[in-house]
Amino acid sequence: MSEALSAGPPAVSTVPARARSRAPRGLFAAAALSALLVLLPIAFTFWRAASFGAAEAIDLIFRPLVGELLINTLMITVSTTLVSAVIGTAAAWFVERTHLPGRRAWAVLSAAPLAMPAFISSYAWVSLSQDLQDFTGALLVLTCAYFPLVYLPVAAALRGMDPALEESARALGCNRWTTFIRVVLPQLRPALLGGMLLVALGVLSEFGAFTLLRFRTFTTQIYAEFRTSFDGGGASLLACLLIVICLIVLAFEFRVRGAARYERVDRGTRRAVLRYELGVWRWIVVAGLALLSVTTLGVPLGMIGYWLTQPGAAAVTPADVSPELLFNATISSLGFGLAAALLTTLLVVPLAFLLVRYPTRFATLFERTVFLAQGVPGLVIALAIVSLAVHALQPLYQSATLLVIAYSMLFMPLALVSVRAAFMQAQPRLEETARALGLNWSQTLLRVVLPLAGPGLGAAAAMVFISVVTELNATLLLSPLDTQTLATQVWADTSTMAFAAAAPYAALLTGISLFASGLLFALLGKSALLGERS
Amino acid sequence: MSELRIRGLQKSFDGTPVLHGIDLSVERGTLLALLGPSGSGKTTLLRLLCGFERADGGSVEIDGRRVVGDDLHVPSEQRRIGYVPQEGALFPHLSVADNIVFGLPRAQRRARHRVAELLELVGLPGNFGERAPQQLSGGQQQRVALARALAPSPTLVMLDEPFSSLDAALRLETRQAVASALAATGATAVLVTHDQSEALSLGHEVAVLWNGRLIQTATPETLYRRPVTRELASFVGEAVLLPGMAIRDRVRCELGELSLSGPTGQGAVDVMVRPEQIRLLRAEERMPNGAATYDAVVTEVIFQGQDAGVALQLRSDARTMVRARVPGYLCPRPGEQVRLAVDGEVTAYARA
């Protein structure tokens, strides 16, 4: 395999000649392990589905239920994606391109909903009104949860756009609106499409929110089939269908990311971005953004606060909170989060290093494989791991170890992006300079590589931590029998409409998530959100 | 008739005045170079003319039509101006041809109206139309940006330091291409630059902006020979400044009695001599016209190929240092004894 490796041309031309040399075998093996780990559950799902006879499979697929699921899933995915695109782009444009009162605050508030898990806002909205179930509620909750995925890249693209482009368009006779349509929007296309596809993937993978909102999609049905006929195989057939839809979306995402590179044509200094005066309209825009923040953050936080003050009996199902359970759930959430953050970061380090220093075709192949996990719903991966464990790894089934490994499989793509960027910062040139100045490799690691890559590694770990704490699917299916986490407790109590009982768990979960997100924000620097040079 | 007429134009940013009452007229078909050091307000003036910023006071007329005035601010898109930004700013999502036709009505855009003609005008091959802007060099991008600005036949073309991001060789070539394209269309143009050689070589007229004020508007020759202030004299070229006494149209200084290019105040003045006006002679040589010569010692030589800068110390007064510019092949050696004489008229500035 390593012979073939050296034949591959380097994917990045800026890498020095040294990089064309062969990667150390250990590094290569470690990187391959990460890729295999991700591939395992996906391959297993297809293998399980393939165990059906063709006729049986066709019977199972072509039934009215699957049609209904398909319509529901596609409808909610398309509408959430479109609404998120409009809201995310509008919010980004107003924040980045107008003299809006409280611009910085709106920038933070427009990104913050990312830290609010969809199933927590579902809990809040359902406890506010049971009428919000079904399609409307699902659209509301998911748009609130996912529009930042459009907002963030579009805002970054708007910040990076050369103001001279818009000025040229104005001088060539375009008014504000035609300038937006003919110049700004085409520039935003990669960011906007990329964000929209991330939203679509998120919605396709969503499970907790749909269950709590009683909206039937592929994920909820897969879970139901798994519950009724444990490891029956019907679930894996549905899962394969869902994986195929997700992979189609993922393929589009790869294309958007890879193809159009609309970077600035020119180099050199750039003026500050153009900002428009809104005049009296600004209060209408502020009101709109305020309404958005109230919907995305205000209502969920408010409802959690409300139920915290209510006695258990006030909810539809009266139940009280046991402080001991609350303590244990918090500890296990934090413990799983930290363990998974550590393991995931460690697992992606070899691959990220390989990608940066030895960018061969195999490295790219491993990278693509890991990114597959991004397109496969967590529920599907969790189910595959359950089956795998039952069939092959019985002693690991429902052990904390397996759960942490499952988390790593799920969130490796997330960590990989950040860790790779971190290694990009620590260029070989700098290391060589340090060695020339008399540092040995361990001193170089300590004084050059880690200070440069450290924030990126920290950011990766923080992102994984946040995702694990707010994760529901794998946790529900794989957590040890006697272990409850904050997420599973919110889910269990909301499912039984014990809203007051769920409140402390939801409050703690949201608190941890928001706090860790704040920490992440600090790690990445304000520039990530506000575009200010530090 | 005047193409561009500016009266008392004012602008401040956050209470700091940037432009103090600018008055300027540009004749039809001429290229005005707007010269100024960085921070002088020249880009602000251009942005006011383009309509990217709002003026605080004053008026602007383009082709007899008022576009800035009391409570009047015609938006950029209705001013019919061509704008060539600093680094071209080609639309990266459009091909070269689509960039060029961007400002035309839809039907003409579809027909790729005049693309080949405009490419030829700016000196690019006609098959460049299908290229992406990313495939072009900096100078080529700049030319396409000019073609794009010229396509809608604007009444006035504004160029914002269009050559500053190019390297020296490319700059000269692009400069020529842009100048001939502008001349061919007979467009009225305003070129903003901080590069004096660019202003002198391209401008039919040069307007100098200094700390937000227009201090001189003149032909390149006049500006170079008779700059209105000492500082400007040093800005538009190398200047040797010597103390002297002015009497009527002549001035007396360490380099003898010289004739003045224009009237100045009488009495104590600073005499400004351009280094290339100082002729170097061998120690025993005399000026053919019998003009006075002065002994000096070469203290330093900066050889630049086609010419050389020579620092000289006068024999008569060791404190007086003079810089001369001589052709490269006549370059003396440090320590050499030479004679020098001043050729042509000089300018003087009254001393406060």
Image (spheres, coloured by chain):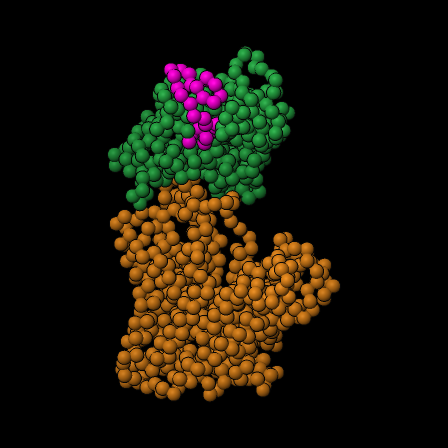
Position of residue A248 relative to residue B73, above or below, is: below
* Front in this rendered view, residue A11 or B153: A11
Residue at x 40%, y 71% (from the top left corner) = A515
Image quarter where the N terminus of chain A lies is bottom right
Q: Position of residue A467 (x, y in %)?
A: 46, 71
Residue at x 55%, y 30% (from the top left corner) = B311
In the image, which residues are magenta? B231-258
* Front in this rendered view, residue A213 or A109: A109
Residue at x 36%, y 48% (from the top left corner) = A275
Position of residue B19 relative to residue A328, above or below, is: above
Task: Say left or right for B6 vs B278.
Answer: left
Q: Please tell me the colour of chain B.
A: green
Q: Please tell me the colour of chain A.
A: orange
Residue at x 55%, y 81% (from the top left corner) = A402
Position of residue A208 relative to residue A140, above or below, is: below
Image quarter where the C terminus of chain A lies is bottom left
Q: Does the magenta segment cover residue A160?
A: no
Q: Position of residue A33 (x, y in %)?
A: 63, 72
Q: Position of residue A505 (x, y in %)?
A: 37, 79
Question: Can I make out residue A20 in this image?
Answer: yes
Position of residue A506 relative to residue A359, above or below, is: below
* Front in this rendered view, residue B172 or A54: B172
Q: Position of residue A380 (x, y in %)?
A: 52, 74
